[in-house]
Image (cartoon, grey):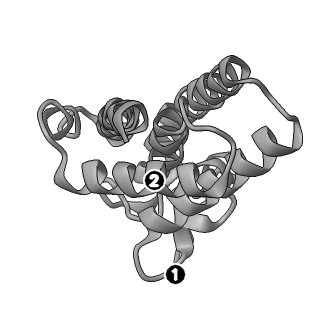
Amino acid sequence: MTTRSKTLWAWIAATFFGAGFGKPGPGTWGSVAAALLWLLIVSSAHLSAIQTGVVSGLLASLALLIGIPAATIVERESGREDPGHVVLDEVCGQWIALAAAPADWLHALLALLLFRVFDIIKPWPARQLERLHGGAGIMLDDVAAGFYALLVFLVIHRWW
């Protein structure tokens, strides 16, 4: 019997410290973990709206930069295309969706719900981005879903 070796840093990152092993719906667990971590960071730091946007953008950028190679490695090592336990893509998209949110649980919940809807329905071009090879395809469809959620969040926040 042979055992596949795992690249530890990639598995820790891609599963967002194990959130991707949550059942049911690992993507939702990843999004919830991202929203909770974001809320902890921005509320404890007492950031302005601009600072919150910058922090959200930096977190999402970091997740994307780490996520593409990590997702590629985990996909290869797990032997499955776009494995469900890879949730750093949801984390990245969730942080994008939160970029304009005030630091409170109600706005974080709205951004979470909007992101999950767009992540599930994957409007154009998210579905097409999902077809890209390896970690890029895994990550970029959720980046698109995050931007859709952010845009709808901004409209709701402005008019409601």
**Going by the image, does 43 lie left or right of 25?**
right
User: Can residue 6 be spotted in the picture?
Assistant: no
The vertical placement of 60 against 123, above or below, is above
N-term mark: 2 or 1: 1
**Going by the image, does 135 lie left or right of 148?**
right
Q: Residue at x 57, y 31 (%)?
A: 60
Residue 105: which quarter of the image? bottom right
In the rendered structure, which amino acid carries the disc numbered 1? Met
Residue 119 location (% of width, % of height): 29, 50
Q: Residue at x 57, y 24 (%)?
A: 61
Residue 13 location (% of width, % of height): 64, 48
Q: Which residue is mark 2?
A: 110
Q: Residue at x 42, y 82 (%)?
A: 24
Q: Residue at x 41, y 50 (%)?
A: 76
**Camera-nearest residue between 114 and 133:** 114
Residue with the most extreme right position: 45
Q: Which residue is mark 1?
A: 1
